[in-house]
Image (spheres, helix red, strand yellow):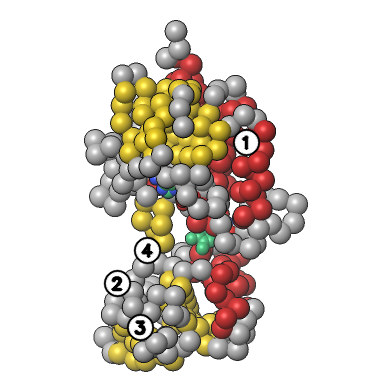
Amino acid sequence: MTGKVDVAVVGGGITGLTAAHHAAVEGASVVHFIGAGVPGGLVANVGELEGFPAAGPVAALDVALRLTEENEKLGVEVVSEDVARLETAGPRWRLSTDAGAREARSVVAATGARLRMIDVPGAARLMDKGVSQCAWCNGSLYRGSEVVVVGGGDSALQEALHLAKFAAQVTIVTRGETLKARRSLIDRAADSERISFRWEAEIVEVLGGDSVTGVRLRDRATGEAEELGCAALFVYVGLSPASQWLPEQIARDTDGHVLTDASFATSASGLFAAGAMRKGYGGRLTHAVGEATAAGLAAVGHAARGKP
Ligand SMILES: Cc1cc2nc3c(=O)[nH]c(=O)nc-3n(C[C@H](O)[C@H](O)[C@H](O)COP(=O)(O)OP(=O)(O)OC[C@H]3O[C@@H](n4cnc5c(N)ncnc54)[C@H](O)[C@@H]3O)c2cc1C
């Protein structure tokens, strides 16, 4: 891996793929570090995207693979490695992976976020033994069973609706009295005979020996405990930004979200950030696409200004 480029894009989710695309369309030389896994990021396993304009239902992996292919046709160099470190090298940025280093005039950081896990007894021990964060991967294992989903946002509801195709009953456990999800998902969940809600409750323990047999809940209003039998627990309780590979001096909020201005510039010249790692990100793929377009173009503009 050698050579200097105009723009480096880091992150193989929809934000990174879109930013690389727009930078290449503008004629910049682009290297795109998509990470070690398949492209697609948080939605890589989602078999049917919500609210993503396309001619009919579409699987995220198909979108991501198609975008990667199109980017390669535009001349984007796609590297299936994680960037471990970013540092300045004179007027450029140096990006290091386990295989080597590359330099770029500007960088778009698009490494998104990871799903948070609940920190209660049993959750880590029973991971992949009934505790899961991928309904599209594991949902069909629970045909005819009772399952619990914890969370109250878009992903909790979207995944609960998918699970309801297999499970006898899906209980959504949520801390609040209302949901934060988009209206269409709330309405579909409310209409499903197989989905019910346990409001104002939190999971305090995941129960089971070799596999999940239930969860212990605490009612947030009364403090009372109760047990709910289930064969699986799917956890969608929010995201943590994946920004640890950025230099320490890049401004972030206390959770690690990168701070940017309205043009997606970070606190360091030539470093832009977009998508789920950014403070103020809207949360939907269409937000990712918009932010990535603007960040990709801003990165090209910065790179061009630095050219002799
Ligand atoms: C279960 C679930 C379902 C969802 N469904 C929908 C939906 O149907 N419609 C919708 O609009 N939104 C949906 N969302 C929200 C959507 O997933 C996010 O808004 C979107 O994925 C953000 O894209 P991103 O590219 O910024 O980040 P991510 O999707 O998190 O992608 C980041 C990428 O960067 C890579 N990466 C991380 N660190 C490094 C590194 N150091 N070097 C190189 N690469 C790295 C990761 O491997 C990943 O590929 C869903 C979210 C979840 C959790």
- C-beta proximity under 8 Å, tags 1 and 3: no
Label 3 SS: strand
Residue displayed at 45% across by 80% down: 130
Mark 3 → mark 2, Cα distance in angstroms: 10 Å
Q: Is residue 74 above or below residue 129?
A: above
Q: Position of residue 50 (x, y in %)?
A: 62, 59
Mark 1 → mark 4, Cα distance in angstroms: 31 Å
Q: Position of residue 164 (x, y in %)?
A: 60, 79
Judge from the rendering whether residue 47 lies leftward or rightward of residue 305; answer left or right.
right
Which residue is identified by label 4?
116
Can you tell which quarter of the image residue 176 is in? Answer: bottom left
**Disc 3 Cβ-to-ligand 1 distance below 8 Å:** no
Residue displayed at 59% across by 62% down: 46
- Give the amino acid type for the residue marked by disc 3 in the picture: Val
Crowd tier of the residue under label 1, counting other residues whose Cα lies within 10 Å: few below 14, some 14–19, many 20 or above: many
Which residue is identified by label 1?
71
Which residue is identified by label 3?
206
Mark 1 → mark 2, Cα distance in angstroms: 39 Å
**Disc 2 Cβ-to-ligand 1 distance below 8 Å:** no
- Give the amino acid type for the residue marked by disc 4 in the picture: Arg
The one nearer the camera, 186 or 26, is 26
Judge from the rendering whether residue 51 lies leftward or rightward of residue 247; answer left or right.
right
- Give the amino acid type for the residue marked by disc 2 in the picture: Asp
Total marks shown come to 4
Mark 1 → mark 3, Cα distance in angstroms: 44 Å
